[in-house]
Image (cartoon, grey):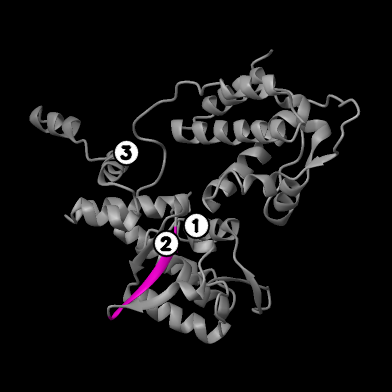
Amino acid sequence: MSNELQPINGMLQAPHRAVFDFSSVLSGRASSLHTRRAYTRWVDRWLVDVAGLKATTGKARTQRMRALPLEPLLPTMGAPILRAWLGRLSGEGLGKQSLNQARAAIVTLSSLLAEAGLLDDYSSAAMGNVRVPRAEDGQRPGRWLSLEQIRLLMQAAEDIASTDTQQARNRVVMGMLCTMALRREELAQARWSDLSVQNNRAVMLIHGKGSKAVYVDIPKNVLQALNTWENFVQPEDGSPLLRRIWKGGGISDQGVTTDALWRIVSEAAEHAGLGNVAPHDLRRSIAGSLQLSGVPIDKISRLLRHSNVAITERYLSKLPQQNEGAVLMADLLGLE
């Protein structure tokens, strides 16, 4: 097999099902919404890279996952192809966590296909034995924004809005991402019913990874943004906290997608002259800023909603820490 994967267009002989409802069966295997979304992204990437299909997003991806086409899919389900694909991803610079998640998605797909009688058990087991290639450990690529850059980003999200409704919504989006350390999946699934007052404190119930639900205090700036946004949407119990907005400023009943949240952050960053900024960079920046300001690690850990402090310590250790030994040596040498 060559190093470069080629799309596979092999024909299936008399398939007893034309499509496979991956979404339905996955919900019984992965309870976390975050995990299901991640797996569907990797399965879509698999279909693009090794089956030669076009990439999908949004509703198109949802429809594809409900009806995976078996004719181009099944010939790709083998250990050699999985191993080569993971090698390609590693060559693109993906870290260990991403590689493990990509492997888990495809191995889960192979297992579910075997359970449905669409893939032989030997092929499924062989794919399960494939291990990810060694990936560089330590600091991964990513941004750690300064406090001033975060302020610029928050303002830019309002500046790029074309209507009052869009501006009000973007203010809520950036306020929550930049202070409450929400993942974009958590923000996309938030509901008005998640907001409440507990012990005289305004709080939000966040539905996180691994089906974990945690209350987080809501800062005053976010409360003010929510009050303004609420006047526009007139929310009902259980309705999405954030909604899509049409070009004319009309507000949809549908909630925003994770892709839409990514675009808001990306476009705001471009407008602010910050280059490429991803939603998770804001979570990383919050952790780093709190650490620099002397906030105890247990408080940072609670905000990030990690299961224990050790995870937070590893998370913080991957941030680009100050390493000024070379600068000090140049000073000692009297070099300018």
Residue underneath mark 2: 177
Image: magenta residue range: 200-207
Q: Name the kind of residue labelled 1 in the image.
A: Arg
Q: N-terminal of the two: label 3 or label 2?
A: 2
* Horizontal and vertical percent position of residue 34: 52, 50
Q: Give yes or no for residue 206 being in the magenta stretch.
A: yes
The residue most toward the top is 1
The residue most toward the right is 14
Classify mark 2: residues with Cα within 10 Å, few (<14), some (14-19) or many (20+).
Answer: many
Classify mark 3: residues with Cα within 10 Å, few (<14), some (14-19) or many (20+).
Answer: some
Q: Nearer the viewer, residue 168 or 114?
A: 114
Q: Name the kind of residue labelled 2 in the image.
A: Leu
Q: Which mark is residue 184?
A: 1
- Element type where label 3 sits in the image: loop
- Disc 1, disc 2: CB below 8 Å? yes
- The picture quadrant where one finds residue 262 is bottom right
- Element type where label 1 sits in the image: helix
Q: Nearer the viewer, residue 192 or 316?
A: 192
- Disc 3, disc 2: CB below 8 Å? no
Q: Is residue 173 above or below residue 75?
A: below
- Quadrant into which the N terminus falls: top right
Residue underneath mark 3: 318
Q: N-terminal of the two: label 3 or label 1?
A: 1
Inspect this view and state whether residue 21 appears: yes
Q: Name the kind of residue labelled 3 in the image.
A: Lys
Q: Main secondary structure of the magenta part?
A: strand
Q: Nearer the viewer, residue 232 or 163?
A: 232
Q: Is residue 127 above or below residue 206?
A: above
Residue located 74% across and 49% down the image: 66
